[in-house]
Image: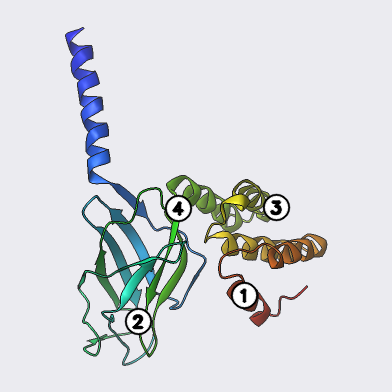
């Protein structure tokens, strides 16, 4: 009985510690981003702050990168929180000059804590030249795992299972108006087209057009730029 009580106390303490320390999201999914090699590797959201662990890989000779002071998190309702500070990256107009192609720069962006129950956000740099952005960054760990699993099926050459999984996710989350919705539609349409299911691709293209998904025009343009129109 003594051992059982101690075990229960340890479990409660671990739960309380988890609540106190917040949430960590590893490699969250997003709908669209501006820079091909820029990544969000991890988000640590605590009651005191939200830390975005970022990286970018250099792909050009003489490449450079910096972060403007005017970076903010945009909530689904249009409100925003501004960047508090950054580490590991110069503030524009100062720049980090890459020494070679393939070099990776790791840095962090620190914001006030993201509000509880927030399902997704946009991360936006507001500047005049070569600004970065991530749209529809998903903060729901369960949803992130389901999307990862669907993409894994596609990578393992099981497109029909991947397509069914993505359709299931959209059917279950459509009413939530999530920022990731555009990514799900795009991949359903592309998978259907690539597996010669033109009827399914056309159906979901039309459904996407009428969906009212956040930043819908940008996702349609993304498909159209690749010659995908139905």
Q: Which residue is mark 4?
A: 119
Measuring from the top left, give residue 157's x and y in whole percent: 63, 56
**Quadrant occupied by the N terminus:** top left
**Image point 34% across, 91% down: which residue?**
61
Q: Which residue is mark 3?
A: 160
Which mark's residue is nearer the viewer, 4 or 2?
4
Mark 3 or mark 4, earlier in chain: 4
The x, y position of residue 122, in whole percent, is: 43, 67
Which of the labelled discs sits on residue 187, or is there none? none
Is 85 placed left or right of 177 in the picture?
A: left
Residue 185 placement, left or right of 123: right
User: Sequence-wise, which precedes: disc 1 or disc 2?
Assistant: 2
Residues under labels 3 and 2: Cα distance? Answer: 35 Å
Whichever of callouts 3 and 1 sits on the residue coming sooner in the sequence is: 3
Q: Earlier in the sequence, mark 4 or mark 2?
A: 2
Tag 3 and tag 2, C-beta contact below 8 Å: no
Q: CB under 8 Å between callouts 1 and 4?
A: no
Spatial CA distance of label 4 from label 2 is 31 Å
Q: Which badge, 1 or 4, is on the more N-terminal residue?
A: 4
State how far apart marks 1 and 4 are (Cα): 21 Å
Q: Which mark is residue 217?
A: 1
- Give me the C-alpha separation between circle 1 and circle 2: 30 Å
Query: Which numbered tag is attached to residue 58?
Result: 2
Depicted 212 relative to depicted 223: above or below: above
């Amino acid at each position: 009985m003594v051992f059982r009580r101690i075990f229960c106390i340890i479990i409660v303490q671990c739960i309380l510690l988890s609540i106190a320390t917040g949430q960590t999201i590893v490699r969250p999914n997003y709908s669209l981003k501006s820079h091909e090699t820029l990544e969000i590797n991890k988000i640590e959201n605590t009651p005191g702050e939200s830390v975005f662990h970022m990286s970018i890989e250099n792909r050009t000779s003489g490449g450079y990168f910096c972060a403007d002071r005017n970076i903010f998190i945009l909530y689904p309702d249009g409100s925003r929180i501004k960047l508090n500070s950054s580490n590991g990256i110069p503030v524009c107009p100062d720049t980090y000059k890459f020494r070679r192609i393939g070099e990776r720069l790791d840095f962090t962006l620190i914001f006030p804590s993201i509000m509880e129950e927030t399902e997704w956000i946009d991360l936006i740099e507001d500047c005049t030249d070569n600004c970065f952005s991530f749209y529809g960054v998903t903060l729901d760990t369960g949803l992130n795992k389901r999307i990862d699993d669907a993409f894994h099926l596609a990578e393992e050459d099981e497109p029909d299972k991947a397509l069914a999984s993505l359709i299931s996710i959209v059917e279950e989350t459509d009413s939530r108006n999530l920022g990731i919705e555009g990514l799900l539609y795009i991949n359903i349409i592309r998978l259907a087209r690539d597996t010669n299911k033109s009827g399914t691709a056309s159906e979901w293209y039309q459904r996407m057009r009428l969906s009212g998904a956040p930043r819908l025009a940008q996702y349609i343009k993304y498909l159209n730029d690749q010659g995908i129109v139905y």
